[in-house]
Image: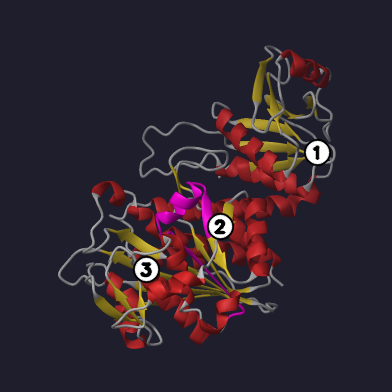
């Protein structure tokens, strides 16, 4: 990952970056450390001459042969809020790929939020997932941040670095092809990442334990695969924790649709169907690294939804953890079945204060909200508001959706307690209503995020790189840091 130094005096000025603010007319921002003689005046004259607007991410390069610095970059930072600085950092990281080192003069009154946003943008935007190093282009490898008091921002940089590292982990897990990634492989990656972390405990249930304890949904969905299902339970339990949060993440390591098989175009990216599990695991590891004072138990129900003689069938009745039964007529609505087990287990055995689940659950998410926004469901106004605030601060978009009780009747089955995949009503809403049936006494302290759309990007956008986005890690870490 990119090396970042906080310094008060520059010792290497090959490339100097100066910020430009958007205003009625763009203007150079006064910096905490004075640039070399004449540089600031030259930059100020360039702003109108180059017709810069100062919009976040705008970049103008000035070549200065025989002088120091040899190249000067004017970087638009918009109105200077955290989001604008994040966009600026991402644009700079992408524009400076021919450089190995750059120095950035930050404003006199730069805030910790701006530094965090800028650092996250720098660290997140260059991400690329490859299984080979052949043909990999060189990238920027070190950045100096010029500040009047570098020590004042050390914690901010550490938080941004952990957030970016955990987002990279979630992206790596999600991008990994399913020829490698099966339930046991995912569990092994969690074990390796959690090893030797104080106050972090891991339990992995295999098929025999799942059967003995009654996790019928996970077993049904994973029954058609040669790679058996798993349930990862990762517990961060610091001594000073006052609140217990359970995070549940859908972990379908590949989804063929089962007997209700998907068409090829809809199947080719189904390695991403465990992005929810990747997000909650990475956020828990990040919380442990940051020593956040909140207890977190993360549940990742893992299964491959495959086609075979052992696959569960449309019309089967599944008995979930705790005894509730589901009639399923669509084996491609499998995610809610594994989540139902995990939610019921959390309510009955873990008894947390708050219960959240993240899942790449429905294509209806993208139909309703587009490619960049998750659908949020909760009956708890304060919880919903807190999560939405964290998502906005982190630069991850979510929108609160209704839980229409008029649709509940569609969940009724003649032969089971619930019908898991009704054809009537709104798809994402119905999936949320189905999950709500397993929240028991935690119904008013539960939140569901359908993240199918924002879990994957078809192209680069600001700090998001094409492929798996790691969506959810950034807002989870912000929200968890605010939990009392």
Pick whichever of labels 3 and 2 is earlier in the sequence: 3
Q: Which residue is mark 2?
A: 473
Q: Position of residue 165 (x, y in %)?
A: 56, 52
Q: Find out whether residue 69 is within the magenta segment.
A: no
Mark seen at residue 302: 3
Q: Residue at x 52, y 58 (%)?
A: 375
Measure the C-alpha gap from mark 3 to mark 2. 19 Å
Q: Which residues are magenta?
A: 352-375
Asked whether 301 or 329 is in front, the reply is 329
Measure the C-alpha gap from mark 1 to mark 2. 32 Å
Classify residue 96 as left or right of residue 389: left
Asked whether 339 or 156 is in front, the reply is 339
Measure the C-alpha gap from mark 3 to mark 1. 48 Å
Q: Find out whether residue 372 is within the magenta segment.
A: yes
Element assignment for label 3: strand
Circle nearer the viewer, 1 or 2: 2
Q: Look at the picture and state if 223 lies above or below 358.
A: below
Mark seen at residue 8: 1
Asked whether 302 or 449 is in front, the reply is 449
Mark seen at residue 202: none
Q: Badges 3 and 2: C-beta atoms under 8 Å apart?
A: no
Disc 3 residue crowd, few under 14, some 14–19, many 20+, Cα 10 Å: many
């Amino acid at each position: 990952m990119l090396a970042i130094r906080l310094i008060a005096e520059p010792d290497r000025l090959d490339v100097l970056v100066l910020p430009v603010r958007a205003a009625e007319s763009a203007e150079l921002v006064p910096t905490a450390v004075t640039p070399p003689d004449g540089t600031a005046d030259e930059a100020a004259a360039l702003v109108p001459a180059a017709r810069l607007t100062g919009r976040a991410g705008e970049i103008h390069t000035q070549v200065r042969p025989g002088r120091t610095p040899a190249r000067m970059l004017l970087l638009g930072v918009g109105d200077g809020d955290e989001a604008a600085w994040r966009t600026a950092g991402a644009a700079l990281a992408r524009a400076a790929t021919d450089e190995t080192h750059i120095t950035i003069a930050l404003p006199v009154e730069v805030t910790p939020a701006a530094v965090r946003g800028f650092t996250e943008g720098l660290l997140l935007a260059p991400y690329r997932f490859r299984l080979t190093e052949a043909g990999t282009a060189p990238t920027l490898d070190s950045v100096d941040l010029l500040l009047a008091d570098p020590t004042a921002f050390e914690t901010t940089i550490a938080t941004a670095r952990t957030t970016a590292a955990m987002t990279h982990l979630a992206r790596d897990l999600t991008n990994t092809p399913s020829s490698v990634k099966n339930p046991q492989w995912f569990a092994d990656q969690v074990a390796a990442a959690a090893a030797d972390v104080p106050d972090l405990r891991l339990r992995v249930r295999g098929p025999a334990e799942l059967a003995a304890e009654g996790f019928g949904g996970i077993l049904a969905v994973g029954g058609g695969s040669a790679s058996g299902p798993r349930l990862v339970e990762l517990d961060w339990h610091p001594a000073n924790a006052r609140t217990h949060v359970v995070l549940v993440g859908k972990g379908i390591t590949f989804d063929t649709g089962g007997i209700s098989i998907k068409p090829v175009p809809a199947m080719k990216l189904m390695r991403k169907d465990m992005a929810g599990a990747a997000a909650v695991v990475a956020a828990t590891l990040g919380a442990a690294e940051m020593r956040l004072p909140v207890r977190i138990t993360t549940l990742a129900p893992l299964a491959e939804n495959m086609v075979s003689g052992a696959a569960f069938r449309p019309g089967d009745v599944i008995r979930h953890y705790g005894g509730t039964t589901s009639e399923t007529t669509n084996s491609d609505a499998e995610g809610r079945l594994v989540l139902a087990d995990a939610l019921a287990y959390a309510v009955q055995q873990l008894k947390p204060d708050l219960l959240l689940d993240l899942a790449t659950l429905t294509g209806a998410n993208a139909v309703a909200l587009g490619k960049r926004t998750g659908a949020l469901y909760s009956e708890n106004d304060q919880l919903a508001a807190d999560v939405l605030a964290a998502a906005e601060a982190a630069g991850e978009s979510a929108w609160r959706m209704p839980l229409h009780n008029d649709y509940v009747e569609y969940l009724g089955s003649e032969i089971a307690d619930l019908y898991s995949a009704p054809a009537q009503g709104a798809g994402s809403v119905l999936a949320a209503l189905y999950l709500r049936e397993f929240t028991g006494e935690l119904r008013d302290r539960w939140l569901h995020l359908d993240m199918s759309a924002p879990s994957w990007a078809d192209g680069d956008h600001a700090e998001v790189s094409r492929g798996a986005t790691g969506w959810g890690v950034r807002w989870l870490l912000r929200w968890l840091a605010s939990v009392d």
